[in-house]
Image (spheres, rainbow, N blue to C red):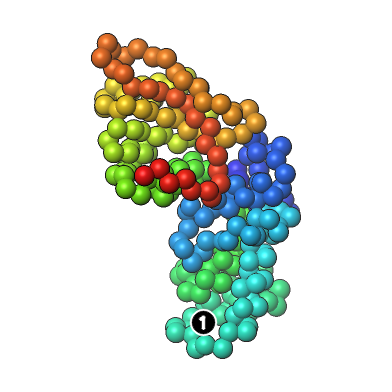
């Protein structure tokens, strides 16, 4: 699990040796890859927060101040959003009755998502896939990028299979099966970079005589730096 409740953070084992600022930054990269633009959190909060929950507490506090100071008219009033924000400011979130609909204001959405349930955790495999896909798209703006069976394909020549958890032979067998059914110059299985996995590993394989696909296991750094490749 990667997330938090009111009392503690839940940190994946591969990241537990990192300092809190780095953990915050990795979490925020994965979180931002999953949500709409209005719910994305600036990375400055990863530097300021002393735990995962505090990232959202700081952001919500700032948004509450900005909302108080804003004098422009609200385009669409949302009673449910107003009720959530009011309860948050008064410290009465535990007394609020949840409704089936989503609040319309970004501030209320954040409060509901983070603090109106016992805990908040990321779906790690889905988040890592989304993060890698988003980063590849931003790094290869002139390339054709698509997803097929959870595998990212670039220009029909290179394939990337993001996996959050490393499962050795099983992962390689899955990749080899996909290589056998398709034609790629390169196939990369990417995992989150951590202290136990920092170097590329080339996998030597033999499927059939004419297959020349390069297969590698790759440590993938979870950050928001974009390197333009074309």
Residue drawn 52% across the image and 55% down it:
32
Q: Position of residue 33 (x, y in %)?
A: 48, 52
Q: Name which quarter of the figure residue 114 lies in.
A: bottom right
- 210 or 80: nearer the viewer: 210
* Residue 228 percent coordinates (x, y): 43, 46
Residue plotted at (43% across, 22% down): 172
Please name whichever residue, 142 or 165, is drawn nearer the observer in this view of the structure: 142
The C terminus, quarter of image: top left
Q: Residue at x 53, y 32 (%)?
A: 219
Q: Whole-percent x and y of residue 210?
A: 25, 14
How many residues crowd around disc 1 within 10 Å: few (fewer than 14), some, or many (20 or more)?
Answer: few
Viewer-nearest residue: 132 or 124: 132
Q: Is 200 above or below relative to 117?
A: above
Please state the horizontal and vertical placement of residue 73, each as a whole percent of the image: 50, 88
Front residue of this view, candidates 96 and 109: 109
Task: Give the side of residue 221 with respect to residue 210, left or right.
Answer: right
Q: Is residue 78 left or right of residue 15?
A: left
């Amino acid at each position: 699990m990667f997330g938090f409740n009111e009392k503690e953070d839940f940190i994946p084992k591969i990241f537990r040796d990192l300092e809190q600022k780095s953990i915050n930054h990795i979490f925020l990269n994965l979180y931002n890859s999953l949500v709409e633009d209005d719910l994305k959190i600036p990375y400055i909060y990863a530097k300021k927060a002393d735990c995962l929950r505090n990232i959202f507490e700081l952001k919500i506090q700032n948004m509450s101040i900005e909302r108080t100071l804003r004098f422009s008219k609200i385009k669409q009033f949302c009673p449910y959003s107003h009720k959530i924000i009011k309860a948050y400011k008064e410290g009465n979130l535990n007394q609020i009755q949840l409704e089936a609909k989503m609040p319309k204001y970004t501030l209320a959405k954040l409060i509901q998502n983070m603090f109106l349930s016992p805990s908040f955790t990321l779906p790690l495999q889905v988040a890592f896939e989304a993060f890698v896909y988003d980063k590849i798209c931003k790094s290869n703006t002139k390339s054709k990028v698509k997803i097929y069976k959870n595998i990212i394909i670039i220009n029909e020549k290179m394939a990337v299979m993001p996996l959050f958890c490393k499962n050795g032979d099983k992962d390689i067998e899955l990749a080899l099966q996909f290589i056998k059914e398709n034609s790629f110059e390169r196939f990369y299985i990417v995992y989150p970079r951590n202290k136990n996995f920092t170097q590329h590993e080339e996998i030597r394989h033999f499927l059939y005589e004419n297959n020349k696909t390069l297969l590698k296991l790759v440590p993938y750094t979870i950050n928001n730096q974009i390197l333009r490749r074309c």
